[in-house]
Image (cartoon, grey):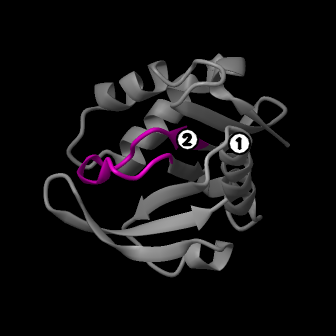
């Protein structure tokens, strides 16, 4: 199993867009996620999207983005849109994807990383510190986390 930037595995872009749109889309159009993916393809620059593959099989995706929560633009960068294919869950892949983004952020010289989630008690077990609640558009309360690098 390998984690690579999506720009090195562009054949998976459509599936990543589909996953993000389905899992995180709520009221957002598919074109919104397509734009995110299109603009996260520059080596060494944020935003970046990564994919986890085993051979040609896509197992998951995660992003290292400049901003993932418009109401908290004071925080950056962000671990964003972590998704593991349903058939691949329960194997610790979410931890591996998180660690990859943590390592990349550290290598890029960042001191901390942020994320938000609608659920509690998932990210804490991976070392993330809950720092309070935030507001996702248009009116959804979400939980904010920080990981010190």
The image shows residue 127 at horizontal and vertical percentages of 65, 74
Q: CA distance from mark 2 to mark 1?
A: 11 Å
In the displayed structure, does residue 93 sit left or right of residue 22? right
71 versus 140 height, above or below: above
Q: Marks 2 and 1: which is nearer the front? A: 1
Tags 2 and 1 touching, CB below 8 Å = no
Instruction: Look at the numbered disc 1 and give the secondary structure of its residue.
Output: helix
The image shows residue 81 at horizontal and vertical percentages of 49, 48
Question: What residue range appears in magenta?
Answer: 62-77
Count numbered badges in the picture.
Answer: 2
Q: Is residue 69 magenta?
A: yes
Q: Residues within 10 Å of mark 2 (few under 14, many from 20)?
A: many
Residue situated in front as seen by the camera: 8 or 45:
45
Q: Which residue is mark 2?
A: 63
Residue drawn at 59 percent across, 64 percent down: 147
Residue situated in front as seen by the camera: 100 or 2:
100
Residue situated in front as seen by the camera: 53 or 67:
67
Q: Is residue 83 magenta?
A: no
Residue drawn at 68 percent across, 52 percent down: 102
Instruction: Look at the numbered disc 2 and give the secondary structure of its residue.
Output: strand
Residue drawn at 31 percent across, 45 percent down: 25
* Disc number placed over residue 104 in the picture, else none: 1
Name which of mark 2 and mark 1 comes first in the sequence: 2
The image shows residue 29 at horizontal and vertical percentages of 25, 33
């Amino acid at each position: 199993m390998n984690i690579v930037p999506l720009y090195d595995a562009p054949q998976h872009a459509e599936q990543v867009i589909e996953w993000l749109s389905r899992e995180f889309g709520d009221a957002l159009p598919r074109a919104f996620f397509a734009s995110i993916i299109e603009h996260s393809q520059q080596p060494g620059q944020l935003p970046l999207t990564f994919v986890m593959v085993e051979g040609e099989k896509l197992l998951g995706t995660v992003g290292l983005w400049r901003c993932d929560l418009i109401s908290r633009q004071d925080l950056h960068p962000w671990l964003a849109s972590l998704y593991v294919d349903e058939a691949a869950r329960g194997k610790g892949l979410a931890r591996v994807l998180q660690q990859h983004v943590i390592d990349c952020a550290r290598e890029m010289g960042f001191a901390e990383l942020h994320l938000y989630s609608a659920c509690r008690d998932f990210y804490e077990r991976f070392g993330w510190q809950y720092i309070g609640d935030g507001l996702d558009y248009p009116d959804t309360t979400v939980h904010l986390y920080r990981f010190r690098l």
